[in-house]
Image: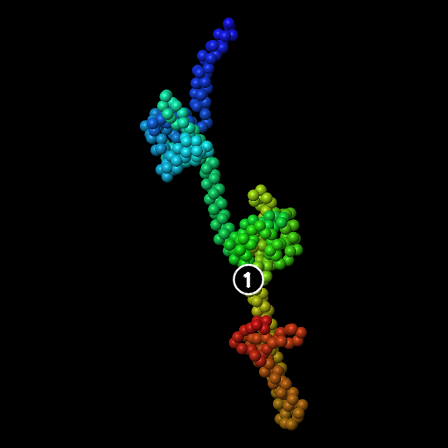
Amino acid sequence: MENTENIKKELELRPQLNTQIVSLLFKHSPIGIYIISKRRFKYVNPQFEKITGYTFKELKKILPNELICEEDREKVRESAISMLKGKRDKPFVNKIKNKNGQIKYILESVCSILFNGEESVLGFFLDNTEEELIKEELKRSEEKFEKAFQLSPDWIVISTLVEGIYLEVNAAFLDTTGYSREEVIGKSSIELGIWADPKQRDELHEILKKYGKICNAEVQFRKKDGSIIDVLWSAHKIKYDNKDCLIAVARDVTELKKAAQERLMREKLQGVLEMAGATCHEMNQPLQNILLIIEEILDDNPTNKNCLALKKQVERIKEITYKLENITRYSTKEYVKGVKIIDIDKSSSYCRINGK
């Protein structure tokens, strides 16, 4: 009999206990909770007041959609209707303005309930501002990287570290090499024959695996048409899609290197010409003295064949030294065994380097 009375009392107390539990959960929940009926707030918990900055008394005077940023209102209405009809089960994100005018990102879910005998909406309201701001910043960073990646005048690639399979390449890579994106993605640099010297690739990748980066290594790459270009290659180890990869930047310096070599050649040749000019200048005086001596001999013996022949050769030497002294632009001619020398007789106002 006593047990029956205890069970009866427990059953009588259960609704009260359930109500107390629900009340405590709503009151102390870290999630904002609200009930809306006939387009008005009928209940909000303390966390909802904290998120919005409004008291329940103030919220009762506000239409619920007035909290939502205007550009999000239609999207929220459609998402809420879809969830109430059971067509959506994932929470939806929207922006609200709190009492101080600050924008808050809210992760929200709703469901239908009866409240005080009326059809109502029970909503759960999570402040997700920090996470959404991080997402936005990450998105902006990704957009900046994508722009820098695609608009860079240097070619940039992301490839797997070991196999060298291309995962991403930018427009400069495609423009320089002559390949299309479809021809490159999923293929390795070895398959495409990008490295003019595959051994150099292996050596540099060993350094990269050991130290994690390489800066401005001078290498040669092969384009689709088979031509070779000189590049400065820099690379850094990264994690990409949870794979060991590298991001590499290559700057085409073919023309710069060619120009530097031509400049060096011009400087060397200019130095040779200056030295030749100085030598000719120093030779002119003794040559002039030799001619005077020959002239004196010929005055006494005008038919001296040796002196006449010597005079002719000295005059020829003087003619050559004069030409050398006055050459500023020149052409070359074949000498022996592929060696080229300056063609003194054809020196003109047009400068041709290396016989070109």
Return the x and y of residue 227 as percentages of the image width and height: 58, 62
Quadrant including the C terminus:
bottom right
Return the x and y of residue 19 as percentages of the image width and height: 43, 18
Does residue 204 appear left or right of residue 100 in this picture? right
- Of residues 299 and 305, the one nearer the viewer is 305
The part of the image, by quadrant, that contains residue 333 is bottom right
Q: Is residue 264 above or below residue 97?
A: below
Return the x and y of residue 350 as percentages of the image width and height: 53, 75
Q: Residue at horizontal 57%, vertical 69%?
A: 266
Does residue 196 appear left or right of residue 153 in this picture? right
Q: Amino acid at mark 1?
A: Leu
- Of residues 175 and 345, the one nearer the viewer is 175
- Of residues 276 and 100, the one nearer the viewer is 100
Q: Residue at horizontal 55%, vertical 62%?
A: 256
Count of all numbered marks drawn on residues in the image = 1
Q: Is residue 221 above or below residue 131?
A: below
Q: Is residue 313 above or below residue 45?
A: below
Does residue 95 appear left or right of residue 158 in this picture? left
| Residue at the extreme left | 61
Q: Residue at horizontal 54%, vertical 77%?
A: 348
- Of residues 351 and 29, the one nearer the viewer is 29
Return the x and y of residue 268 as percentages of the image width and height: 59, 69
Q: Residue at horizontal 54%, vertical 50%?
A: 168
| Residue 289 visible within the image | no
Location of mark 1 (residue): 256
| Residue density around tag 1, few if under 14, some if 14–19, many if 20 or more, within 10 Å | few
Give the secondary structure at mark 1: helix
